[in-house]
Each structure stands twice: as C-alpha cells, then as structure tokens.
Amino acid sequence: MSRPRILIVGAGFAGYRTARTLSRLTRGRAHITLLNPTDYFLYLPLLPQVAAGVLEPRRVTVSLSDSLPDVRLVLGEADRVDLDDRTLHYTGPEGEGGTLAYDRLVLAAGSVNKLLPIPGVAEHAHGFRGLPEALYLRDHVTRQVELGASSDDPETCAARCTFVVVGAGYTGTEVAAHGQMFTDAQVRRHPLRQGMRPRWMLLDVAPRVLPEMDEKLSTTADRVLRQRGVDVRMGTSVKEATHDGVLLTDGEFVKTRTLVWCVGVRPDPLVESLGLPMEKGRLLVDPHLQVPGRPELFACGDVAAVPDLENPGSYTSMTAQHAWRHGRIAAENVAASLGLGGARTPYRHRDLGFVVDLGGAKAAANPLGVTLSGVPAGAVTRGYHLAAMPGNRVRVAADWLLDAVLPRQAVQLGLVRSWSVPLDTSSPEVARVPGGPGQRQEASARSGPGAALAADTDDGGIGAGPARYRPPDEPAKGQPGSGATQVRPGSGAAEPRSEPETAKGRPAAGRLGPGHGQLRSESETAKGRPAAGRPGSGHGQLRSESETAKGRPAAGPAGTAAAARAADEPAKNRPGGEPARNQPGGEPAKNQPGGEPAKNQPGGEPAKNQPGGEPARNQPGGEPAKNWPGGEPARNQPGPAHPSDPGRPPPAPHPAPGPVKRTDVPDDPDDSTKGDS
C-alpha cells in the first residue's frame, strides 16, 4: 500500500511547525513535501535587530533540510492549485515549472506587505517582511548617514538623516526604536554638522503606539521612543510620497530619502485564486483548520480565517503566536484524517502576553498579564525569543553578548539593491535578481561592481525612486530591448542616458535599427563627432583622438588599403589566420592600457559581451558569429576590393581621414528614440 502524500505550502511559523509535527507523528508512514521559496525558516520577530546590526542575518534563519530531515524540500513558489486533480503547480527559483500531487494539502503561505492607495508609496517605500528587505534597510541607513556626514549642504544632510517609518504596530515600533539607536551610534564616530542628529519619525493613524496591544504596553513603548528621540506622531500618516520626501496628512512636507512601510500585512494572494469562501482576504476554515467541503484541504497561519473559540464571532489575529499554534493543530488533524494519529482537535488558545524589544536593555512585556518595563522586561523578552526559536540559540545569545561589549560594525555590504526589494511583491522573502522567474531583464549597469551606487546616492528620491525599480515587464534602460546607453571609455560601468539626451539626436550606444553604437567619450559627443563605424553596419571601434588627429582613417567602408589586402590575407581573428591582437600570443590588445584601440574585437559592437550589455554576437546566447565558418561574413572585417564578390556589400568611396559620418543614425532627432521598447 502506497504511503499518503502530504504537501505543505510555506515554511513560516505555521508551515514549519506543521512539517515538524507531522514528521514526528507519521514516523515515515507518509510522504511529506514542503514547498518554500527559500531553504530556511525565518524568525521574523528578530528581523529589526538584523536591520540595526545587532544580529547577523543567518542567526535568525534555521535550515529546513537540517531541522526537517524526514521532509522533502522543494524550492519554488506556488502558482495555482487544481483542487479537482489534487495537484499544485509551482515555479522554481530558476524559472523552471513543476507539478506536485497530494492527498492532503496544507496552505500556510503566510502574508505580504499591505498596500494602501496612496500616491507614490509603491514606487518610493520599502517593506519589512523578509530578510532581503532588512539587509537593504541596514545598508541604506548606513549609507545615508555616511553621505550626510560628508555633505556640506545642511538641507541635504538633514534629508539624508531623516527616516520615516509608517505604522506603529509591533514591527514599525521596533524598527524605529532600534533604528534610532543604530544611527546615534554611527554619528558618534562620524559626527554630522554642528547641532544635527539623525531623526526618526514614527507615523500612524491610530490614536496610540501598539494599538492592538495592552494600553500599558503602549504607554511604556511610547515613553521609551520619545526619550530616545523618536518623533512619534499619532493620528498622522503619509498623504503622498514624492521624489524628494513625503507629504503628511497634516500638510507638512518632510524631506527624506527613507520611507519604511510597516502598516500591516495581507494574506498571500495564492488563496484568492482558489475560488473558495473568504473572510477579508483569508480562507475560511472550521475550528479544525479544515476548509468546509474540502476534506483534503487545510489552511493555517496568516492565510486562514480561524474562528476564535474564546471570542465567538471573531477570528484569530494574524500574529506569529497564533501561526505557531495553528501549525501544531493542523498537523494533528491532518494525521488524524489519514488514520495516522488520534482524534481531531479544535484550535483553542490562551493569551500568554506579548513582548516588544525596544533595543538595548529596554523592552515592554506583559507575560501572563504581568506588565513589565525596563531591564526586567528586556530580560523576559530575550528569554522568550531564545525559548521560541527552533535553532541558533547559542549563536543568537553570543551576538547579544558581543553587542553589549563591542561597538557595532556599520558597513555597507551592497548585497541587496533597492530595485531588488519592491514594496509591491508577492514574495518579500526573495530578493529579485536579474533574469529571475517572471522578470527576464538584465541587471542595471549601476548595480555592477565598481558602480557609484547611483540608485541610492543621488540627491533626489526616497528608497527606490520612480526609476529605481522596474516592473517585470519593463526592460531596463541600456539592456536588450531598451533605449540608449552611453558608456564612457575607462569608466568601467555603463551610464544610462536620459530621454532628453537621446532626443537631442546624439547617437546612443543602444539598439538603433541595425546599427549599434560604440564607446565614445562625452566630449566627442558634445563636439558633434559621429561615432567611427562602418556605414550601414554600425559596428563601431574604439579610437583615440590622437589617432584621428594623425590622419589615420577610421574603420570605414570597404575600399581602404586594409580592405584591399583582406581579400588575400586571412582575417586575423578567424580560425586559421594570425593570432588576434587581443588574444594570447598576439600583439597586445589595442584597447588595453598602453595600447591603441582594438580594431578586431569580435562583433565590433561595444560592451555587448560585458555584464549589463547585449550578448556578443559570437558568444553563447547571442546571434551566430559572423566571422566563424558557416556564418555570414563579419561586418567588422575588411571587405573585398571588388564589389562583384557575391555575399559582400559593394565598396564605398574612400572616406576622408577622421571620424566617419554614420549613415545608420537617422537624421531626424526624434527618430533616435525608436530603439526604446
């Protein structure tokens, strides 16, 4: 007899607890599969300490493979569920699709950032639901303080060192409390202008901090925040987020580069596609966490509307405590439905209290209804977290001890860019990467090695800015299928050109019909010199101005002396010919320091085989190499002396020494933008 198949979607508090309990109850009598985008369980309550530099990122993660040895882990994100066929379709981390069959399905997909219809928020704010968002915030805050300390403009310094947190719930309160301590420690080593200090603002439309918790906890947290210097504004929120700051509902405009969105969460959108009864976005279940009418389907955690038997007529709130307890009950009832456990158990709970870590030795807690504050509350809070964590307890305790006696390391790791963590995402636990599933755009050249962090260091914008995050269906500028990108020789990183520049008729190094631009200095462009290239082909070459001044002809049409010799001599970068000048054994590359510009680069197009550019035509994934056997003649190779040779373009008149006028660039300046898509 085959073993039953149990599929669990999500490895948050509910999903992880379900998998661990089921593994213990079934003892190998069932196939247990866990589908999750990451290979770790994230302990969310300690995420603010990661953003503040107290804990290292791996301290708040627990390996699923190590802690769940009898559970099969499948990496991927659920796309849809076929309830009739009892199959689930998912997408893997590299874009591959897959299907999983089940006899019992437990939906524990968790929640995502809650969006409100406020102009500019989706473009300029960042959430705080996943590890990538915490890492980004840590780098971003560090960078803003460092730039503010080095700025000579008081207004710029004040804007960079102003941090706005929207949402005074559990997460927002802890982020503001830890953030103020983190930036204060930074400015002690990198002082700001005379009399200035970092400013953290905590906004919420609620009448008090922590509105969903006990009023005594709220009062304690409010007092600690204000003593620490946090600007707490209740009854106030964001009316509009702009490139330069945020407009508050009371009419004040606050200049800032940082907007942290902690207004709440909403269930994962997966459950909406099931077509089953819902309650405020959550899937309705009975007290046994089973979907009515679907004996094979269970739901728990933030995606499930679980009746609160202690308060008839209401549902349990979306908290980690409830999700953790849901997981155990769901596992017991799934095992019971398969005949592998005891009787079914309804979900009941007893409030054990809450703890709020406010940084340092400060906290607010009410364990078993006893209100605590100060050092005792801090001790209870950290003890509770150590007991609740399913792993890494020793490492977490060691980090806390080191943080108490050593200064924090405020450095930018640069691992997560602003466009990698958009606010509007169904997977806050996964950072977006170039070429990832659902977004086949390449990485922006600004995020490459050696780039100047333009996405985060320009004078305008908060968070990602309007152009810092690209939707999956919008190509990156300077990437295949996009508009123009200009590359400065020697800069090492391509710089996206603005639309006004393109409209002025400057030949862009992008895709303009069949021609492709070349690497040119901005001074050349400003002088109106067209790029050296082959009319009609557009494959430009790197040339120094000294060469042009000496009267050496540019790489122009066939008919030059070099072109006449090419009919009898083998191409130097073709198989069987002389070694290429930029290959081992040949002459030094002419586009390397100390040499002349290379005239025999494969493809002839600039930067197309570099990161962030289009693929070189003789590289894997690009067009067939035109200078290899079986391909078309290379367009950047000298042509024959006579036009009668079939398959080759006829020779053009000999150009005058100096830059050659490009014929592939339209005369109409407005046409220069037609390469955008």
Image (tube, rainbow, N blue to C red):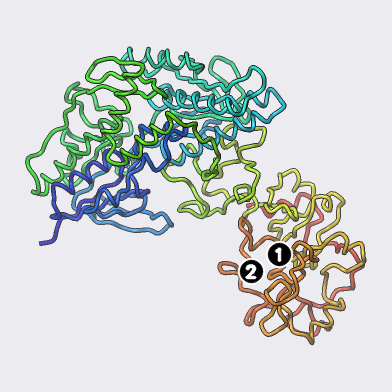
The residue drawn where x is 37% and y is 24% is: 357
Viewer-nearest residue: 496 or 184: 184
The answer to whether the residue labelled 1 contacts the one labelled 2, judged by CB atoms less than 8 Å apart, is: yes
Viewer-nearest residue: 263 or 584: 584
Location of residue 44 with respect to 195 vertically, above or below: below
Q: Secondary structure at mark 1?
A: loop
Location of residue 510 with respect to 566 vertically, above or below: above
Whole-percent x and y of residue 419? 54, 43
Which amino acid is tagged 2? Answer: Arg
Read off the residue under disc 1: 605
Whole-percent x and y of residue 330? 19, 40
Viewer-nearest residue: 451 or 58: 58
Whole-percent x and y of residue 36? 33, 48
Location of residue 208 with respect to 560 vertically, above or below: above
Which residue is farthest front?
A: 405
Q: Splitting the image into 4 quarters, where does residue 20 fall?
A: top left
